[in-house]
Amino acid sequence: MQDFTDQTQRMLDYYGLFQDPFGDQADATVFSGAGERLEVAEHLRHLLSFSPQDCLLMAPTGGGKQAIAHQVIRLLDDEWRVAWIDGGDIDRLDSASRELIGQLGLGLKTDGDTASLYRNMADATAQRSNDGENFLLVVQNADLLSPDVQTWLQSMRTLAPRTDIRLRQLWLASSATAIAQSDNDDHWYSLVLEPFTAAEAAAYLNDRFAGSGQANGVPIKDSDIARLNDMAGGMPGELNQVVRDYLIAGTFKTTERKQGFPLTHVLAGAGVVTLIVLTVLYSNQGGEPDVEEPVAELALPEPTDSQAIESEVQQRLAEAVARVEARREEAAAAEAEAADQAETAAATTQPSQPAPSPQPAAQASTQTATPATTPTPSAPAPQPATAAPSQGSGLMANAADNEYTLQLVGVRNRASVESILAELPNQERYDIVTSSYQGRPWYVLIHGRYSGPSAARADIANLPARFRDQEPWARTFASLRNN
């Protein structure tokens, strides 16, 4: 199987692109104003420059918050100094203060008590603002900040002599649930990014392709863009993934056969296939097909070249659906875990109080409510019929719903996956799960039990090479039992 780089190069060559429309370089050089994103960026720039409020921008993972924040920075004048931190990486006050002092170039020592340090930071930014400089802090994953760090970062506005010479702040979050004082309209201007409509998705993709060398627009029909956008939930980040898989599926068979099969034929078949995949998605029957499965096993009569390409597109789109769901599941789990940690920390520890006047922490203690957590629905009881370990390994029988495993292979023929398993060492670490895909049995080979998605992905490097090359993905045992 080709690796990620080879597949990308096929796509670039086929469409005459000089860079991946969905890669990091495009992220850094192309900003799409689709869905009024440009207006949002300009509005935030204006508020940060002139309003006494700081800004809170909210959208689910993949919603485009970071792209807008980078555009806001581009719109700022040269006299602005910007610090960017990730709430998922900052878990201590000293870490936050070191990042602020270093990135903003404040030249302060980090020793001394917390109250004095943050007061000195506020005084330094105020003094230099009076001299013509401006300071901005962007907090990515702000809802993952601990309550203590949140309190002190928010105190910077009250420690400043005037709000117009304060450290301005732009926080990016999935929601405001875990953010203290987010409902204080005097302190925060909150804005929620809406998902793309089909027309906005088409405009967004057009900008990405134009910025990558495709002058003739998006090489996908509007009707297919609409379906792909539905699959991505209108989220730009997810749309990048599913469209990329879609395009690679269309180019893979064509270039491999070394003949110019018309793209319109690929898309015509893909339109029908996409409807099938969406039906699977909405009925929560999303097993992940395996790209190595023989075409004959899909029960297609005497497949022609065009039918083989449609089958490849179908598999790629189904993989895209599965990965989108996996990413959403991981993001939801991470948010729930962060909210639980924040609630525990708020209940067991009292945030440090800023010393002399003004007293921002005192304000925080009266205005900050314990972050609410959205109850996690109870996972359905395990269904023994869906777990069919061929070696009696017991992974499905013994693992908790919230534990993770790696899905390696999915096929129609159970004998095929059993033959694969028979050749593997340490068979007790594998299991075969019987699920359903498009109304027919689907047999999935899984590996291992892990406490979280990061631990699962870290173990991919230890898998046999035949699986590493197929991009295994982490999923919960609950999701397997629900198939």
Image (cartoon, rainbow, N blue to C red):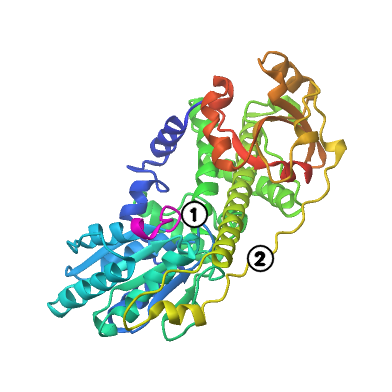
- Which of label 1 and label 2 is nearer to you? 2
Q: From the image, give the main secondary structure of the stretch colored magenta.
A: loop
Q: Is residue 89 magenta?
A: yes
Picture coordinates of residue 145, whole percent (x, y): 46, 61
* Left or right placement of residue 222 versus residue 375 in this view: left
Viewer-proximal residue, 89 or 272?
Answer: 89
Picture coordinates of residue 238, whole percent (x, y): 53, 53
User: What span is in magenta?
Assistant: 87-95
Q: Quadrant of the C terminus?
A: top right
Q: Contact (CB < 8 A) between labels 1 and 2?
A: no
**Residue lying at 56% horizontally and 37% vertically, measured from the top left:** 455
Q: Which residue, given by chain and number where applicable, does mark 1 sit on? A: 237
Picture coordinates of residue 393, whole percent (x, y): 77, 25
**Residue lying at 30% horizontally and 79% vertically, measured from the top left:** 159
**Residue lying at 45% horizontally and 53% vertically, measured from the top left:** 218
Q: Secondary structure at mark 2?
A: loop
Picture coordinates of residue 427, whole percent (x, y): 71, 19
First in sequence, mark 1 or 2: give its number.
Answer: 1
* Distance from Cα at disc 1 to Cα at disc 2: 24 Å
Residue lying furthest right in this view? 385
Q: Is residue 9 above or below residue 30?
A: above
Q: Classify mark 2: residues with Cα within 10 Å, few (<14), some (14-19) or many (20+).
A: few
Amino acid type shown at disc 2: Thr
Viewer-proximal residue, 142 or 274?
Answer: 142
Q: Which residue, given by chain and number where applicable, does mark 2 sit on? A: 374
Can I make out residue 193 in this image? yes
Residue lying furthest left in this view? 131
Q: Is residue 194 above or below residue 382?
A: below
Q: Secondary structure at mark 1?
A: helix
Q: Classify mark 1: residues with Cα within 10 Å, few (<14), some (14-19) or many (20+).
A: some
Amino acid type shown at disc 1: Gly
